[in-house]
């Protein structure tokens, strides 16, 4: 099994997939962000903070960070877009993401201040002190969390959700921070994706239901194929074992792999059913023996000893039937 962090990072670093998920999340599927307009950014963020008169360097690593010029409605807006891939639910994600975004803004202020001081742009003591002039502006930073796990995200999506019994008088003064989340388990409009990312997300959502997988297969048709990297993501995050050898051209045909998954699920279900059936039959046999021995006037101690011998039970197991 491939490393989940590496697989999700490589898959979402692809500019087509990166643009696709942002177009889905921000623009409802409209193709506004173009892959060719994306520029890789350094995902390592550094901030120097003064704490207890000691200089502490905090270094945090984002999964993926890209800059983009968004051209929409006759406007051109530059933004910094980050992605955090989560294979497991992170119950402190609002704090983690708020730190990432704050570090990005702090880095922008530091760089602008450096340039301003170099150009001697400060007009007064206030601008000189901050290094930031009244005309300087920041570039918006947006972070998107992707839930790759096998269950719906049940963690907090805002900073306020992480606080307990917040005093109503304080609440209006506590700044909230909400995470942006793409959770395949809540998506209904998979057709708004233009890359195979939509199929990958839909598979993640349907993975726990043979009925849903069969319905997906029926909808896609027998010739439905995905690129090896998409199948690798599916195998990594769902535990599927779809062979990468069943190829037609450069695509993996999904039909055979999914049908094998469904059949394996049925076999496992039948196996569990037989196991439960044997347990139930054993239980009925022991209870029947206990009733017969009681009818013969035997004591609990005698009955317990008898069913231990007859059904190969331990004394503590026999007590359950007394």
Image (cartoon, grey):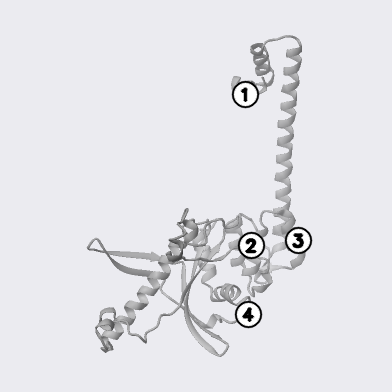
Instruction: Give how far apart the Cα atoms at labels 4 and 2 are.
Output: 20 Å
Mark 1 secondary-structure assignment: helix
Give 135 or 290, whichever is nearer the viewer.
Answer: 135
Q: Residue at x 72, y 58 (%)?
A: 212
Q: Quadrant of residue 222?
A: bottom right
Question: Are the two marked residues, 2 and 3, in contact with CB atoms closer than 8 angstroms?
Answer: no
Front: mark 2 or 3: 2
* C-alpha gap between disc 1 and disc 3: 45 Å
The residue to which callout 2 is attached is: 186
Q: CA distance from mark 2 to mark 3?
A: 17 Å
**Which residue is at the far left?**
53
The tag earlier along the polypeptide, 1 or 4, is 4
Image vertical order of residue 202 relative to residue 25, above or below: above
In which image quadrant can residue 221 be found? bottom right
Q: Please give the residue where the numbered disc 3 appears in the rendered image.
A: 215
Disc number placed over residue 317 in the picture, else none: 1
Q: Secondary structure at mark 3?
A: helix
N-terminal of the two: label 2 or label 3?
A: 2
């Amino acid at each position: 099994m491939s490393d989940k962090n590496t697989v999700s990072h490589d898959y979402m670093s692809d500019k087509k997939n990166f643009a696709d998920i942002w177009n889905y999340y921000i623009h409802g599927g409209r193709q506004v962000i173009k892959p060719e307009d994306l520029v890789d950014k350094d995902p390592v963020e550094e901030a120097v903070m003064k704490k207890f008169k000691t200089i502490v360097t905090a270094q945090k690593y984002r999964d993926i960070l890209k800059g983009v010029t968004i051209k929409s409605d006759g406007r051109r807006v530059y933004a910094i877009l980050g992605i955090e891939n989560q294979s497991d639910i992170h119950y402190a994600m609002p704090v983690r993401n708020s730190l990432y975004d704050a570090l990005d803004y702090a880095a922008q202020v530091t760089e602008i201040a450096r340039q301003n001081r170099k150009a001697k742009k400060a007009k007064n003591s206030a601008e000189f002190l901050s290094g930031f002039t009244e005309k300087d502006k920041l570039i918006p930073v947006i972070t998107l969390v992707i839930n790759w796990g096998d269950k719906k995200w049940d963690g907090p999506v805002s900073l306020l959700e992480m606080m307990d019994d917040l005093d109503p008088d304080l609440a209006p003064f506590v700044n909230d921070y909400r995470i942006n989340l793409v959770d395949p388990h809540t998506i209904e409009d998979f057709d708004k994706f233009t890359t195979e990312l939509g199929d990958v997300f839909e598979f993640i959502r349907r993975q726990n239901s043979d009925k849903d997988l069969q319905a997906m297969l029926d909808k896609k048709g027998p010739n439905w194929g995905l690129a090896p990297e998409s199948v690798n993501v599916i195998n990594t995050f769902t535990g599927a074992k779809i062979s990468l050898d069943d190829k037609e051209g450069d695509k993996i045909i999904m039909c055979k792999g999914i049908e094998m998954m469904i059949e394996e699920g049925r076999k496992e279900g039948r196996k569990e059913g037989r196991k439960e059936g044997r347990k139930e039959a054993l239980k009925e046999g022991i209870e029947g023996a206990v009733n017969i021995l009681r009818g013969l006037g035997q004591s609990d101690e005698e009955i317990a000893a008898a069913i231990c011998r007859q059904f190969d039970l331990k004394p503590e197991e026999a007590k359950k039937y007394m």
